[in-house]
Image (spheres, rainbow, N blue to C red):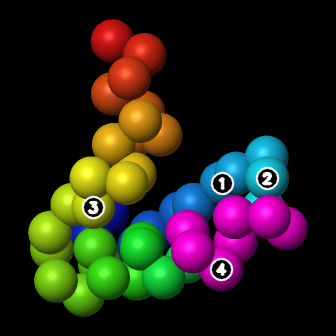
Amino acid sequence: MTGRHVAFTHSGATLGLIAGELLADEIVTGERSPLLEAFRPGRFQ
């Protein structure tokens, strides 16, 4: 589905503010933040 985004973190209280800001920027600009690369689902491949 397009237009829907989901974010999950086990450290939500600690990282919620910066994660929200980084994810919002990715959604608006379409550019991936290098700060989030280590947390993407593709790391399990």
Image location of residue 15, percent across then percent down: 69, 64
Give the left or right position of residue 25, taking residue 7 as reference: left
Mark 4 secondary-structure assignment: helix
Provide the residue designation for mark 2: 11
Distance from Cα at disc 4 to Cα at disc 3 = 15 Å
Q: Residues within 10 Å of mark 3 (few under 14, many from 20)?
A: few
Q: Position of residue 42 (x, y in %)?
A: 33, 27
- Note whether 45 is above or below 19 in the view shown: above
- Asked whether disc 4 touches disc 3, contact meaning CB atoms under 8 Å apart, the reply is no
Marking on residue 8: 1
Residue occupying the far right of the picture: 13
Vertical relation: 39 (above or below) 45: below
Earlier along the polypeptide chain: callout 3 or callout 1?
A: 1
Kindly report which numbered mark, 1 or 4, lies closer to the viewer in this rendering: 4
For marks 1 and 2, give the one nearer the viewer. 2
Element type at mark 3: loop
User: In this picture, is 38 found above or below 43?
Assistant: below
Residue 37 versus residue 5: which sits nearer the camera? 37
Mark 3 or 1, which is nearer the eye? 3
Q: Amino acid at mark 3?
A: Ser
**Gap in Å between the C-alphas at discs 3 and 1?**
16 Å
Figure quadrant of the C terminus = top left
Q: Residue at x 41, y 36 (%)?
A: 38
Q: Which residues are magenta?
A: 13-19
Kind of residue at badge 1: Phe
Q: Is residue 28 left or right of residue 20?
A: left
The secondary structure that most of the magenta stretch takes on is helix
Circle 2 Cα neighbour tier, 10 Å, few/some/many (<14 / 14–19 / ≥20): few
